[in-house]
Image (cartoon, helix red, strand yellow):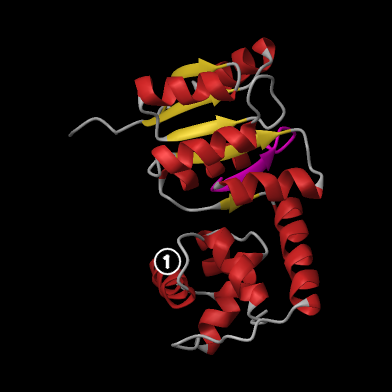
Amino acid sequence: MPAQEKIRILLVDDQNMFRAGMRLLLSSQTDFEIVGEAVDGEDAIAKVNALKPQVVLMDLRMPVLDGAAATRRLKATHPEVRVLVLTTFDEDAAIFDGLRAGAIGYLLKDAPTDKLYEAIRAAARGESFLQPSVAARVVAEFARLSEQSPAAAGLAEPLSPREVEILRLLANGATNREIANQLILAEGTVKNHVTNILTKLDVSDRTRAAIKARELGLL
């Protein structure tokens, strides 16, 4: 049988001890490969160019070039690279800066180890991942914005009741597996529904689906 293809990961953090700990932790997973480390945003951009990682674990507060600015530049030049923010900062401004820059997920450094592994694997598949506490902040903020400025435009094709149900769970940070378990559906069925939801909302990932749904008043 062919060897399992590993997820190529770049660690970006200005703290040497944290990077060393993350390298040790992630190396315990047989499907992860740490291809390099970077100490700031500029270094991250150079390392992405040279090492071609699939997933970048990006800190936000760093010297030279911060994580949000680095993410924005990486997404402009390497749209295929998935940036997963991994930071100690859970302020609203930091969360929204990272997501607006193009990060596919946002995780705090004190998140459980299994959630970190799950987030990396989700990012490699092109799926967004928000820690539940972060997802709640995103949903609350866009609910507030939608109340202040309701969207006038609707959708060309409306969501079905089942799709709205799945969208609500998705917006609260639930994974496909968690949605499947809660709604007693096959995980593949949930994945198909999520694909349809993204298409109807004309967005590229789950985070932006939640954001647009709030803007349109669908949740």
Image spot of residue 188 (x, y percent): 38, 66
Please state if 123 lies on the left or on the right of 99 as rendered. left
Q: Nearer the viewer, residue 71 or 89?
A: 71
Of the 4 image quadrants, the one containing the C terminus is bottom right
Residue 152 placement: quadrant: bottom right
Residue 112: where, in percent of width, then height? 69, 38
In the image, is residue 108 part of the stretch drawn in magenta?
Answer: yes
Q: Which secondary structure, mark 1?
A: helix
Image point 70% across, 33% down: which residue?
Answer: 87
Residue 156 vertical placement versus 40 (above, below): below
Q: Residue at x 65, y 11 (%)?
A: 16
* As drawn, 200 above or below 25: below
Relative image position of residue 198 (x, y in whole percent): 46, 70
Q: Compare residues 88 and 188 and report the one nearer the observer.
A: 88
Quarter occupied by residue 64? top right
Q: Amino acid at mark 1?
A: Lys
Q: Quadrant of residue 183?
A: bottom right
Instruction: Specify whether residue 167 is painted magenta.
Output: no
What range is drawn magenta here?
Answer: 103-112
Location of mark 1 (residue):
191
